[in-house]
Image: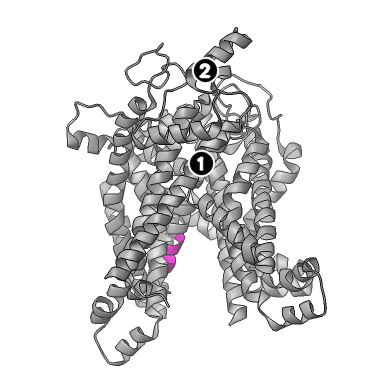
Amino acid sequence: MSIHEIVLALSLVGFFGYALVSKKRDFVWISSIGILLTLWLKFLGWTGTLQFFGILIEVIIVSAILSYLYRSFLILVLPEKLSKEVSTAPLTAAFGLLMITIYAFVGIFGPALAPYGEAEVIADAFAFRNEEMLLGADQIGRDFFSRLIYGTRNTVGLALAATLAAFVVGTIGGLLAATQGGRLDQIMGRIADVIMSIPSLIFALLLLSILGPKWWVLIIAVGIIYAPRVFRLTRAVAGNIVVMDYIEAAKLRGEKNSYLIRKEILPNVTAPLVAEFGLEFCFVFLLIAGLSFLGLGLQPPTADWGSMVRENATLITYQDSTPLIPAAAIALLTISVNFVVDWVLFRSSGLKE
Amino acid sequence: MDGLAFLIIKRLFYGLLTLLALSVIIFFMVELLPGDTATSLLAMGKTEETLAAMREQMGLDRPAVVRYFEWLGGVVQGDFGNSMVRGVHTSKGVSDMANVSVISIISERFMNTLFLATYAAVIAVPIAITLGVLIALLRNSVYDRIANVLTLTSISSPEFFLAYILILYLALKTGLFPAISTIKDDMTFFESLERTFLPALTLVLVCIAHMMRMTRAAIINLLASPYIEMAQMKGIPPWKVIVRHALPNAWAPIINVVALNLAYLITGVVLVEIVFVYPGIGQILVDAVTLRDFPVVQACCLIFATTFILLNLIADVVAIVTNPRLRHPK
C-alpha cells in the first residue's frame, strides 16, 4: 500500500467517524458510499485510481491549510477596513485570493524567476525532463518550464488588457446611455443587441480573419464583443440610480453630466461592476485561450498557454501529460477568480438586504 | 389568439431584422480591408489593366451596396460565392481547383457538425435538467455544494483541456474509445456514434455544467415565489407542489436555458472539432481564418450566427406561447 492509499483510507474513515459523531445524515451517506467505492476499486486492483484520489485529498488538505494561513496573514497585514472584509471570506475565496496573488507574482517577476529565456533553444525537441529542465523541452527544444512562467505574463496580461478595454468602453457607454437617455440610449441598445446576437468565438474569428492575428486585434475584438455585456449591466444598475432624488437634486444644483457620473453615480455602481469584472475576465480568458489554442492568439516565439498546448499536443499521444499543464493553469486561475467573484457577489448582495 | 399571432410575428420580424444587420456587418467588415478580392487573387504580376479587367469580370467595379444585395440574394438561394484559396479545403483532395464554390465545401461538413451537436444535445439536455431540478430541490445541502464545485470546475476549464484529458484517460490509457474522430460515409450509424463519442462527451460535460447551474437558478427563483409558499402551507405533498405548481411555470425558463446552451454548443463545437480532427464546419472556419479565405469565413460565420439567432428566436417564441403574462403585455 502506498502513502497515498493510506491517506485516502484514513481520511475516509475519519470523515465517516466525524459524520457519525456529529449525526449528519448526508455526511454518513457520502462517506459510506466513498468507503464502499474504495473497497470495490481495491478489490478490482485499480491502485492507480485510488492513488489519484489519495493525492487529490492531499492537495485539498494542503490548499485548505495554505488558504487558511493566507487569510490570517491578510487579516493581520491589511488596513483595518479591508481586513474586516477579508475576515468574512470563506476558504474557497481565500484560496482564490492566494492563487491570484501567486499568478500576479509570477506574472510580474516572470523573467527573474525563469531559468531560461522565452525563445532560447537549449535542447533537442521534446527532450526529457532532467535537473536543468523541470518539465523537459518543447517542440523545438525550448525549456517548457521557463515558457510556462513567461506565459503567465503574456496570457494573463493580454486577457487583463482586453477585459479592461471592454470594461472602459462598456462602462462609459452604459453611464452615458443612463444619464442622457433618449435616442442615444436607444441606438446604443440596438447596437449592443446586434453584437450580442453573434456567438463570441465566431465574431472573434471574423475579426481576426480580417485584421490578422495580432495582439492589438485581440484586444479590440474582445473589447467589441464584451463591451455590450458590460454596457447592459452598467445601464441597468445606473438606470436605477439616475432616478434617485439626490441625482435630481444635483441636477437642480446645475451640476454637469461629468460631475454626476463621477461623483454621484460611479461610487454607487462600483460593487456590482467589480464582480462583473471578475466574471468577464473569466470569459475573456477562456476565449483568448481558445483562440490561441487555434493558433490565432499571440504569435510565436511569444510564450502563450493556449498555443503551448496545441504545439506540444503530440506528447499526449505518448501518454505524457506535460502539455496539459498550461491548460490546467488556465483552468486553475479561472476557478480561483470565480471563487472570489462568488464571495464578492454574496457580500454585495448581502449588504444590500 | 390574434394577439398571440401578432406577438410572434413581431418577434419573428425582429429576428429577421437582426439577421439582416448581421449580414451587413459580415459583408461590410470584409469590404473595410485595404485592397479587394481582385488584388489578392492577382497577388503576383498584376498590372493596372489586368486588375481593371478582373474587377469588371468579378463585378467589383460596381458600388458596394449593389454587390451586397447581389451577395445576399445569392446567400438566400444557398450560393455563397467561390472560395478564394485554391482547393485547400476540398475533402476530395483536389489541390489545384480555383474557384470551388463555398457551398460545396460546406454543405457536407455542416451535416457532420449538426450530427455532433445533436448527439451531444440529446445526451446533455435530459441529464442536465433532471440534475438541475434535483440540485435546486436540495439547495444549500452538501450535494449542492459538491455539484457547485464540480460544475464550476467544468465551466472554468477550457474545452481543449477537458478534451485532452478525456483522450488521455479514455482513449490512450484504457483504449475504450478512439482518440481521433474521422468519420466516413460508409460507416454505420452506430460506428459513427462510437467514433464521435469522445467529442460528444466533451461537449456534454461543459454543456451539462452550464445547463445545470442555469436550471438550478431558474427553479430556485421560482420556488421563492409566494404561490409556491402558499401551496406548501396548504399542506400539499412536496412532489405535487413541484409537478402541479412549479413545473407549469418552469417550462419557459427551462426551455430558455436549453436554447441558450444549444447556442453555446455551436461555438464549443469549433474547438472540439479541432482537437478530435472531426471533419466539421468549425475546422473549415478555422482553416479559412488562417488562410484569410473570406467567402468561406463569411459563409461559416453567417451559418453559425444564424443558428444562434434562430435558437434564441425559438426560445423567445416558446416563452411567449407558454407564459400568459408575456402574451398580454400591459
How far apart are the alpha carbons under marks 2 and 1?
23 Å
Q: Name the residue under label 2.
A: B56
- Disc 1 marks a residue whose amino acid type is Val
- Disc 2 marks a residue whose amino acid type is Glu
* Mark 1 crowd level (few <14, some 14–19, many ≥20, 10 Å Cα): some
Residues at marks 2 and 1 on the same chain:
yes
Q: Which chain carries label 2?
A: B
List x then y, in percent, for residue A345: 58, 69
Q: Mark 1 points at which residue?
A: B24
Q: Quadrant of residue B249?
A: bottom left
In the image, B8 versus B99, the foreground residue is B8
Q: What stretch is highlighted in magenta?
A: B144-149
Helix, strand, or loop for circle 1? helix
Q: In which quarter of the image is residue B327?
A: bottom left
> What mark, if any, has residue B207 been given in the picture?
none
| Tag count | 2
